Image: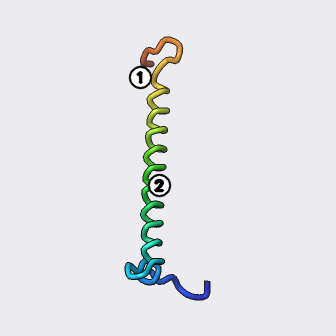
Amino acid sequence: MSEQFNFNDAFNSQTMRGRANVAKATWASVGLVYVLVKMHRRNSKRRDAKLYCKGCQQALLHG
């Protein structure tokens, strides 16, 4: 890129291109938050699953 990125030109609310860029950025941020929440919940379920015995469904004692 020979020219620098100009935030005001890319997200100008007066032009259709700027509005489209705002919409795309909004959807991208919503998607990113969704993925991060899913990853966090998945990791917490894995941590909780390690605390139980698979065969007897009783809590394992760590001590």
Under circle 2, the secondary element is helix
Position above or below: 11 against 26: below
Residue placed under numbered mark 1 in the picture: 63
Residue placed under numbered mark 2 in the picture: 31
Percent x, y of residue 24? 47, 66
**Residue 13 appears in which quarter of the rendering?**
bottom left
Q: CA distance from mark 1 to mark 2?
A: 40 Å
Which one is closest to the eye, mark 1 or mark 2? 2
Q: Which mark is residue 39?
A: none
Q: Callout 2: 10 Å neighbours few (<14), some, many (20+)? A: few
Q: Earlier in the sequence, mark 1 or mark 2?
A: 2
Position above or below: 6 against 31: below
Residue, far bottom: 3
Residue at left 44%, top 39%? 41
Kind of residue at badge 1: Gly
Residue at left 43%, top 81%? 15
Percent x, y of residue 35? 48, 49
Kind of residue at badge 2: Gly
Camera-nearest residue between 55 and 22:
22
